[in-house]
Image (tube, rainbow, N blue to C red):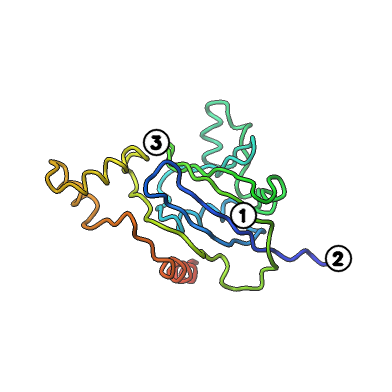
């Protein structure tokens, strides 16, 4: 009986494009994960709330959830897409190789784009129960619905100016303090484990 190949850990660097300060994370994920699973983890580790559409671009192909593919089908574009539940991280690594890049798009209205870099080939068999794990990163995720990179730049400008006529409204909207440099590596990993245990 042939033994199945053991899953491997894949190091990825994720960068949120066109924002200052640069928001980035370095993670280790299992190569047997689907891109649907990767999407869920990216939402967590970056800091989004998964309340908008998303898609990946891998080479010339687009990968998305089934409901988004069906919506694209109404425009005649469905043939360009693959279902994210059927594409593995291992398949992406195989196609792009070490140092290959692919894109993750979130909230098509705000237009958030993330560059994902495969930092090296899969590095070890997955025996570590901590995976997935975030090993490094910097800076806070922008708030949802802030208006994309341009809206985020304006948001930070207004927050920094107590004399701005919209300052108090934005403080209320964000619920108090917002630190663009806020990033707590230990909390991200600890809270992911807690959230994972609570999932049905």
Residue 105 percent location from the top left of the image: 49, 42
Relative side of 164 to 102, left or right = left
**Is the residue marked by circle 2 packed among few (<14), some (14-19), or many (20+) residues within 10 Å?**
few
N-terminal label among 1 and 3:
3
Q: Residue at label 2?
A: 2
N-terminal label among 2 and 3:
2
- Depth check, mark 1 against mark 3: the one in front is 1
* Separation of marks 1 and 3 at Cα, in angstroms: 30 Å
Residue sitting farthest toward the front: 21
Label disc, if present, on residue 109 of the rendered structure: 3
Q: In the rendered view, would you say 35 is above or below 188? A: above
Disc 3 is placed on an element classified as loop
Residue at position x 56%, y 37% in the image: 69
Q: Residue at label 1?
A: 119
Q: In the rendered view, would you say 197 is above or below 70? A: below
**Is the residue marked by circle 1 packed among few (<14), some (14-19), or many (20+) residues within 10 Å?**
some
């Amino acid at each position: 009986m042939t033994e199945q190949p053991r899953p491997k850990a894949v190091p990825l660097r994720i960068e949120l494009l066109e924002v200052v300060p640069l928001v980035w994370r370095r993670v280790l994920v299992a190569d047997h994960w689907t891109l649907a699973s990767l999407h869920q983890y990216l939402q967590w580790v970056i800091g989004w709330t998964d309340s908008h559409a998303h898609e990946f671009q891998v080479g010339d192909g687009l990968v998305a959830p089934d409901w988004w593919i069906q919506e694209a089908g109404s425009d005649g574009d469905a043939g360009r897409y693959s279902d994210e539940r059927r594409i593995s991280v291992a398949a992406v690594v195989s196609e792009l190789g070490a140092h290959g890049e692919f894109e993750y798009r979130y909230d098509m209205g705000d237009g958030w784009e993330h560059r994902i870099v495969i930092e090296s080939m899969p590095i070890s068999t997955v025996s570590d129960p901590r995976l997935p794990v975030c090993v490094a990163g910097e800076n806070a995720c922008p708030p949802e619905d802030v208006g994309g990179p341009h809206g985020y730049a304006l948001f930070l400008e207004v927050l920094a100016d107590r004399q701005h006529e919209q300052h108090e409204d934005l403080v209320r909207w964000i619920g108090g303090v917002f630190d663009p440099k806020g990033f707590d590596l230990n909390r991200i990993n600890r809270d992911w484990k807690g959230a994972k245990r609570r999932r049905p």
